[in-house]
Image (cartoon, coloured by chain):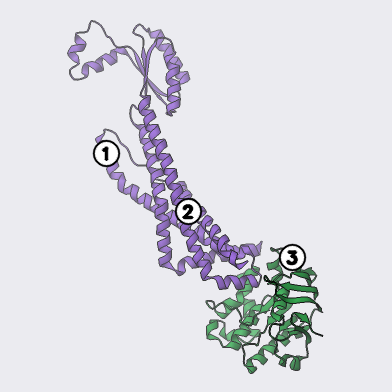
Chain colours: A green, B purple
Amino acid sequence: MIEASNLTKRYPGGFEAVKDVSFRIDAGQMVLITGHSGAGKTTLVKLISTIERPTSGSLVVNGQNLAALGRHAIPHVRRHFGLVFQDQKLLFDRNALDNVLLPLEIAGLPRREAIRRAQAALDKVGLLAREKARPIALSGGEQQRLAIARAVVNRPTILIADEPTGNLDAESGTAILDIFADFHRVGVTVVVATHDQSWIERYHPNVLRLDHGRVAA
Amino acid sequence: MNAWFTQHRAALVAAFRRLWAAPLNTLLSLLVIGIALTLPAFGYVALDNLRDLGRNATGVQQISLFMNLDASKKDVGEIENRLRAAANGKWRFVPKEEALKRMQSSEGMAEIVASLPRNPLPDAFIVEPTNTEPEALEILRKEIAGWPKVAHVQLDSAWVKRFDAFLRLGKLALWMLAGLFAAGLVAVTFNTIRLQVMAQSAEIEVARMIGATDGFIRRPFYYFGALQGALGGLLAALLVLGALRLLAGPVGELATLYGGAYSLKLPGFAAIAALAGIGALLGWLGAQLSVSLSLRKFD
C-alpha cells in the first residue's frame, strides 16, 4: 500500500515539482500517473522509489514512512521495488543475463540460484534465447523488456515505471503494456507514469492525474 | 551470513577479474608498487644484516678485565665467581704467563720480553656478554670496574656506540623513506581506483537505484586495492630476494678477505608475508580514500 499526505518536493532554487499531493494506492492495484510534460509525474515516481526525498509531507509505503527513512535504510527499501526507466539504464558492458543478475547479486543470492531466477525472468519477458546478447544488440522493445526482467527478478511487491513505452513504436509499446498487465494480474502493485493514453483504453487502470505538480480534479 | 559470504566472494572474484582484464595496466601498477616497497624492504634487510655483522664481529663486544699485578689465585677465583653470577654470556681467563707467551710470539717482541726482569703483564679475563646493547655493556663495564683487585676494564664502547648510532640513523632514514614510498603506493592505488570508479559510474548509479548498499559498491574496490598491494608486496619480496642472492657471493668473499665468515641473512616466510600484508593494507587505504571521495558525486 502506498499513501501520500500533503507530499511536496521543492528543488534547490525553489521550483516545486510536486505540491501538497495526497493519494492512496492499495496493494495489487494498477495505477497510472498521467499529466502533461512537466506535471510532476517523474518526480512523483522518484519520490515513491526513494530516489528523491520529499521536502515535506509523508509518504508511507508498505507501512514505512519514506520521508523519515535514514540514509542506510534506503537501499533495503529499494529492493522491494522493481524500477523501470524510460532510458532503461541497462549496463552495456554486461550481457542480458548479467544485467538481470545485478539485483540478485546485490541481494546476495548464491550464484546458481541467481542464474536460475534470472533465466526465469528473461523467459517471462521472452528474452531467454537472447541471454548472452549485449543490450546494444537488442531492439528498443527488447531493451525495455530486459529492463522489466531486471525489475521483477527480485520479486518486488511494487513495480514502478517511468514512461516505459516513451521511446517505443506502437507494437513494442503494446507488448510492454501486456507484460505490466501480467504482473498486475498476479498481484503485483503496478505504478506507471505515462502520458500514453492507450493504457487507459486497454486496461482501465486507476488514474492519478497531475497538473503543475498538483493532483488534478 | 550466507549472503554476506556470497557478496564478499563475488567482490573478490570481481577484483581478480579487474586485475586480469587489463594485464598491462596491472603489470605496470604492480611494478610501481613493487619497486616502491622494494627500496625500504631492502634497506631493512641490509640494516638487519649490518646489525648482525656488527654483533658477530670479533672483539667488538668484548670486555677485557685486567687484574692488579699482585692479584692472587684466590682473587682470580673471586672474579670468576662474580663473572659467573653477573655476566650472562661467555668469558675466558687469560693467565699472565699465557699473555707473556703471546707477546713473545709477536714479531719483534721476543727480545724486548727477554730483557724484562719480570713478567709485567697481569692476569686477565675476556668477557663476551649475551646482551651486546651499548648501554648494557657500559653498565657491565662499570660494575666490573668496582670489583676487588681489578686494575682496569676495557670496552671499545666508542666503536660500539658509533656503530649503534649509525644503525639508528639508518633506521630513521629507512622509516622516512618507507613513509614516502607508502604515501606513493597509496597515491598510485588512489588514482587507479578513481579511474575505475569513473569507468563504472553507470553501473554504480544503476546499482544504487536498485538497492545496492554502500558496502556492496565499495567492496570490490577495497578488494582490488588490497589485492594489488599484496601482489606488489610479493613482487617486492621477490626483488629483494633476488638482489640478496646476487650479493651473497661477493659479501662472502669480502668476509673471507677480512678473515671471517659471513653469509647474508635472507628474509623468511614471516617477513615476506608481512611485506605482502603491508602492501595490502596500504592498497586498501588508497582504495578507501579514493572510493570515499569518488562516490560523493553519487550521493
Residue located beneath label 3 in the image: A69
Mark 1 — on which chain does it sit?
B
Type of residue at label 2? Gly
Q: Residue B6, image x and y in percent?
A: 61, 65
Q: Work out which quarter of the rendered image holds the N terminus of chain B and state it.
A: bottom right
Residues under numbered marks 2 and 3 in contact, where contact means CB atoms less than 8 Å apart: no
Whether labels 1 and 3 belong to a single chain: the reply is: no
- Regarding residue A39, the answer to whether it shows in the image is yes
Mark 3 — on which chain does it sit?
A
Residues under numbered marks 1 and 2 in contact, where contact means CB atoms less than 8 Å apart: no
- Closer to viewer: mark 2 or mark 3: 3
Mark 2 — on which chain does it sit?
B
- Closer to viewer: mark 1 or mark 3: 3
Type of residue at label 1? Leu
Residue located beneath label 2 in the image: B279
A134 lies above or below B187: below
Residue located beneath label 1 in the image: B254
Q: Residue B50, image x and y in percent?
A: 36, 38
Q: CA distance from mark 1 to mark 3?
A: 73 Å
First along the sequence among labels 1 and 2: 1
B142 lies above or below B290: above
Q: CA distance from mark 1 to mark 2?
A: 34 Å
